[in-house]
Image: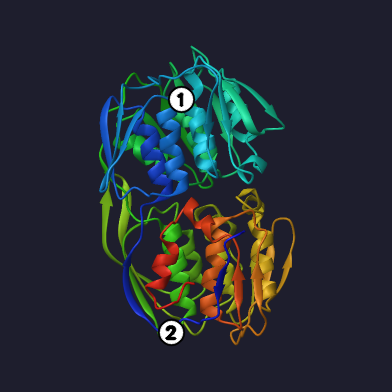
Amino acid sequence: MKKILKINQKIKPFTKEISIEGDKSLSIRWALLASQAKGTSKAYNLLRSEDVLSTLKCLKTLGIKVKLRKNCCEIKSKGLNKFNYKNNITLNAGNSGTLGRLIMGLLIHSNKKIKIIGDKSLSKRDFLRVTEPLKKMGASFKTSKGRLPIKIQGTSIPKPINYIENKGSAQCKSSVMLAALNTKGVTSIKARKSRNHTELLYKYLNIPIKIYKKKKIDIIKVRGVKAIKTFNYKIPSDISSCAFFITLTILSNKSKILIKNVNLNPTRTGFLKIIKLMGIKTIVKNKKNYKGEIIGDLQIKSHNTIKPINCPTTLNSASIDEFLLIFLIAAKAKGVSFFKNLSELNEKESPRLKWGSRILNKIGIKTKTTKHSIKIFGNPQLKVTKKVEIKNFLKDHRVFMASVIASIAFGGPMWHIHDRDSINTSFPSFLKKISEFGVKIN
């Protein structure tokens, strides 16, 4: 039987200071790069979610030594491309597109066949976006229409390539960057603006990389290496996870929150820039640079007046994981908000653009949607008067968590939100954090 969360409680005013688990993108990237560094690397505040645990399990299957301790994670490797595994092994990426796509780049030099699988949701997502450039580097693939399961076999001499990444996907860019480590020469990537965690880690590790920033694109050049140094990393809090509590604060009455040690990488803070355009102020305290990443403490208060927005598409990539929450904020705006060029949202764990519209419709907000856009007719006096049920969303963790935020921010007679275990993908402690705000979790 599916696990259903039942909520019929509107949150009371609060003043809270909280800390959030480590950034998922950085947790996965640390693990993958640590698997290529000769020696022992350690990570603190590593996110213990299913996506990250799937990453560690895949590395173990590839012969990497992994120790998950109470306060840290240790990875011990023999160095670049020193995986040790049998032919025809299977790697299960679970629900993680980041893991599934990035690990293919690491396997460019593999001389044995490997099968990569994922769960029902991941198996519906497009992998041609990474298999095509990796083919040009010398890997071979067996797949059905670019979907999982996929069989990969690498090459003994990976070739550097010129690659155009036009989707604004950090996963595609990073997969090619990881493959480039094993080449003799320079791989050049012309990429639409997207998250730059991999680039910052390369700089910190002194991996030969040059970045030329243009208005809408980055030109990234990566030279192959013979070795990578080990590194320890204290992973900052995930801005995408923090966004749920920021949204809750904005939509609540007379409330204030301080979130400690948050990753404020400019390629990830589109959410903060969008809500600023909606008249919502965020205060950053204790801002500093940590191994290339900008981190700091975020303070925010509730807002009674929210401005509608014609959202600049230049902010889409830097806020792609937070749009369900932005839609909830727009629901309380005084006027009509418009968001476009969001087809990439439907390439996530579920068709999130459709689900954003469905959730709003269920609580009485009118929307108009196309394949890539949504118009939201806000209502500052919104009151939920009917029972709301959220189900059949392919166990998308962000749909579940956004629904929980909506339920306690807007209230209503009763919410039934299915698949509560979906949070294990990215934010296992989410409901525990919610309960700290005085919300009863049945």
Secondary element type, mark 2: loop
Residue 196 location (% of width, % of height): 43, 44
Residue at image x 46%, y 81%?
A: 11
Element under disc 1 = helix
Q: CA distance from mark 1 to mark 2?
A: 52 Å
Residue 268, located in which quarter of the rendered image?
bottom left
In the rendered structure, the answer to whether residue 10 lies left or right of residue 309 reads left
Q: Answer above or below: position of 221 versus 329.
A: above
What mark, if any, has residue 325 been given in the picture? none
Looking at the image, which residue is at 52% across and 40% down?
171
Q: How is the image coloured?
A: rainbow
Would residue 106 be visible to someone looking at this image? yes
Label 2 sits on residue: 12
- What's the amino acid at mark 2? Lys
| Residue topped by disc 1 | 180
Q: Earlier in the sequence, mark 1 or mark 2?
A: 2
- The number of discs equals 2
Tell me which corner region of the image, top left, top right, bottom left or bottom right, holds residue 419: bottom right
Task: Indicate the position of residue 233 as horizontal and vertical percent values.
Answer: 28, 43
Q: Amino acid at mark 1?
A: Ala
Could you tell me if the residues under marks 1 and 2 are in contact, i.e. CB atoms within 8 Å? no
Quadrant position of the N terminus in the picture: bottom right
Residue 135, given in percent of the width and then of the height, sits at 60, 22
